[in-house]
Amino acid sequence: MISFLIKRIIFLFLIFYIPSSFSEEQSNSHMQSYSENKKIFKNENEKIGYALGVSLGNYVNQSFEKQKQLGIQLDKYSLLSGIEDAISNNLKLSNQEISKILEKLEEKIKKATTIQMEKNEKENLIQGQLYMKKFSKIKGAHKTQSGLMYIIDNPGSGEEITENTEITVHYKGFLINGVEFDNSYNRGKPVVFVLKDVILGWQEGLKYIKKGGKIRLVIPPSLGYGHSRFNGIPGNSTLIFDITLIDVKNN
């Protein structure tokens, strides 16, 4: 039963897990204390136990900070007390009570997360519209009736592209804040697909160039992934793609 409860606690932390690590600044600030205290360990096993404890402590701190951002305040010292009591097998609450408390906490976190996501989606939509307004003022920028915006760097030449065309492309995808979420150039391997199988923004935008062409697409959520979160892309995100059309095959 204790094992089950520990798994539940870990699950709650994983909702907001950020890999624990010290920044360079943190490392430097603590280097002196590390040096001073390194002799207190009697053997390697004690060091390993301490390292695991520090990792858990960082993990807890980061998880609590994330939950605080959602308006959920938890007491770190009560958590430490709970860990100590579990290890000593001296619980102040029954396993049934603990299970119910964790279920309520899990539900509270889910509700708070949903509220935060909806707030973020609204903000993403507003910021995306502002970005597209600025983009429209760039020389060579075009906007279509669907809301797609683009700049053609190189129109290319050759066959017209249709929905059933198999195309080979290299591309880089990023958000309006500059965060990159995909890059086939870095992988060193172009992507091959049939045009009708990709998002609407690509289906429309790639028809404006031909083989050898290069284009930048600015895709509103309605032509991208909408409210859905996909591969690290937040809901209601405006997407930017720099695309090179390497090859075209019309069957």
Image (cartoon, rainbow, N blue to C red):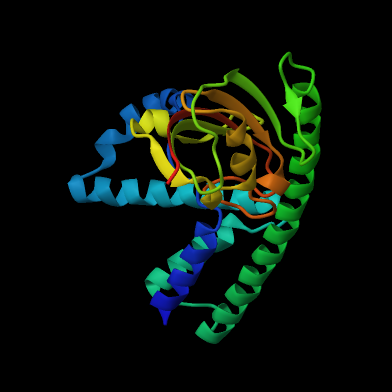
Place of residue 102 in the rendered image (x, y in percent of width and height, measured from the top left): 58, 73
Q: Is residue 152 above or below residue 7?
A: above
Q: Is residue 172 above or below residue 14?
A: above
Q: Is residue 180 above or below residue 16?
A: above
Identify the image quadrant of the N terminus. Answer: bottom left
Q: Nearer the viewer, residue 50 or 139?
A: 139
Q: Is residue 22 left or right of residue 124?
A: left
- Residue 19 shows in the view: no
Q: Is residue 101 left or right of residue 245?
A: right
- Residue 228 shows in the view: yes
Place of residue 41 in the rendered image (x, y in percent of width and height, measured from the top left): 25, 43
Q: Which of the 4 quarters of the picture holds residue 109?
A: bottom right
Q: Nearer the viewer, residue 161 or 40?
A: 161
Q: Which of the 4 quarters of the picture holds residue 19?
A: top left
Place of residue 131 in the rendered image (x, y in percent of width and height, measured from the top left): 76, 28
Residue at point 35%, 33% (across, down): 187
Residue at point 54%, 63% (across, down): 12
Q: Nearer the viewer, residue 63 or 236?
A: 236
Residue at point 72%, 36% (across, down): 148
Place of residue 165 in the rendered image (x, y in percent of width and height, measured from the top left): 49, 44
Residue occupying the far top of the picture: 139
